[in-house]
Amino acid sequence: METSTQFWKEHKKELAKHSYYSGPFEWDNSDNYMKVLGLISVCYLLQREDLLPRLLEVILANAEDGLEPDSTIEDFFYYRFKDRPDTGYVQMGDHAILISDAIRGETKEKQLESLSAYLKDWYREMIGMSDLEYQSHLDPEQNGYCGYWAFEAAAIAYLDDLDDTELRQSPYYPKDMVDWAREQKRKRGGEAKGKVD
């Protein structure tokens, strides 16, 4: 990501001259939108929050072309950057609203309710977003197939320290990533305590 982001920043004007060019992380269609949410989520889950400022910078650069981040994208960045604005609108319809509701839930129970509803319909909602990815596990070469994972649901459960027992029943919930992220957080907490003692 670092190399491609740097290349894009250095060559944005030249790239824009080509009619087939589109900027990175544009979310003007639901497939790209979900990829952006997934990428932000994976940064949190893999303990790579150091990549978020660069990712935000590239996403905001799309705003120059009239593509402002919506409230769900902003909500994900708010976990790290508390001064981000609330844009007040969701770009990609009802399914993305469930993720926004999960982040903004007034109680952990309401958050879990939204995440459960999101995961229940996750695969069905993903059908048709990208013909390149839908049922890509059936391709003998599996070009680009990395599993069917609702990283955004996992990131919320991790960041808000939700009891994800029910969510773990969904085949699309990456529970192993959540477990790993929580273990890393515990280790960091133990290291911090050790330094104080």
Image (cartoon, rainbow, N blue to C red):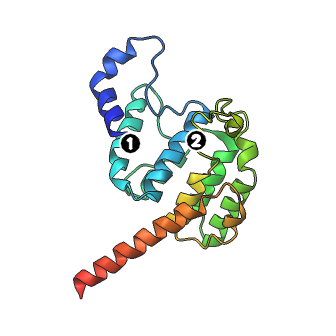
Pointer 1 local density, CA inside 10 Å: few below 14, some 14–19, many at least 20: many
| Foreground residue among 53 and 85 | 53
Q: Which mark is residue 142?
A: none
Residue occupying the point 71% across, 49% down = 122
Dot 1 or dot 2, earlier in sequence: 2
Q: Which mark is residue 34?
A: 2
Residue that label 1 marks = 55
| Foreground residue among 148 and 60 | 148
Residue 85 seen: yes
- In the rendered structure, are the residues bearing label 1 and label 2 in contact, judged by CB atoms less than 8 Å apart? no
Residue 164 at x, y = what percent? 63, 69
Residue occupying the point 58% across, 44% down = 146
Q: Secondary structure at mark 1?
A: helix
| Foreground residue among 73 and 140 | 140
Residue occupying the point 51% across, 41% down = 36
Q: Three-letter amino acid code at disc 2?
A: Met
